[in-house]
Image: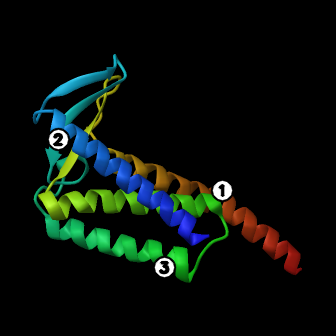
Amino acid sequence: MQIIYLLISVLVIVADQSLKHVVVMNYSLGETHTIIPGVISFNYLRNDGAAWNIFSGQMWLFYLIALVAIIAIFYFLFVHPKKSRLFNIGLCLTLGGIIGNLIDRIHLKYVIDMIQLDFVNFNIFNLADSAITLGILCIFIYLIFIDKDEKNREGSRLK
């Protein structure tokens, strides 16, 4: 079953890297194109930091964080797996996003960002960032709402 989950990570990586490639090949740096008026645009930027460009240029920190996160995700997928699809899908979305951005950081020394939300003042981001955010949201939903219900059911069965 873990192989199916890892395929989710591979799909995230391929989609992220493909969109980045399309943007780099077809846009000039800083060029913006409206996709859905008033909703979303593509704006080609390079980011050598994290969100809000914090820790700009600190590649060693991003390599370290990525390595620790990848090890933790593999631990929870293979050594101490949960039976929850939501939790496992969250891990694999996060894994795919981390690797998608790590590829950029290793290869380019920056991350390619392009998705701009036009209806709100928010950072420009990429598919990898979206996968990380959605994955962490899935993990939090599981841990906050589902995991404790499962533990309560298990506890009541043991009585």
Looking at the image, the residue that sits furthest to the bottom is: 79
| Left or right: where 143 falls relative to 11 | right
Q: Is residue 60 above or below residue 98?
A: below
Q: Nearer the viewer, residue 19 or 128?
A: 19
Q: Residue at x 49, y 61 (%)?
A: 7
Tell me where residue 138 sits by quadrant: bottom right
Name the amino acid type tagged 3: Tyr
Q: Secondary structure at mark 3?
A: helix
Pointer 2 local density, CA inside 10 Å: few below 14, some 14–19, many at least 20: some
* Image coordinates for residue 77, horizontal then vertical, percent: 53, 74
Name the amino acid type tagged 2: Val
Between marks 2 and 3 in the image, the one whose residue lies nearer the viewer: 2
Mark 1–mark 2 contact, CB under 8 Å? no
Query: Residue tagged by mark 1?
Result: 145
Which of the numbered marks, if any, corresponds to residue 116? Answer: none
| Left or right: where 39 falls relative to 33 | right
Query: Residue tagged by mark 2?
Result: 24
Name the amino acid type tagged 1: Phe
Q: Quadrant of the N terminus?
A: bottom right
Q: Quadrant of the C terminus?
A: bottom right
Q: Residue at x 13, y 55 (%)?
A: 56
Query: Residue tagged by mark 3?
Result: 75
| Left or right: where 130 falls relative to 139 | left
Upstream in sequence: badge 1 or badge 2:
2
* Image coordinates for residue 50, horizontal then vertical, percent: 23, 53
Pointer 1 local density, CA inside 10 Å: few below 14, some 14–19, many at least 20: few
Q: CA distance from mark 1 to mark 2?
A: 41 Å
Q: Secondary structure at mark 2?
A: helix
Q: Residue at x 86, y 80 (%)?
A: 158
* Image coordinates for residue 100, horizontal then vertical, percent: 31, 57
Upstream in sequence: badge 2 or badge 3:
2
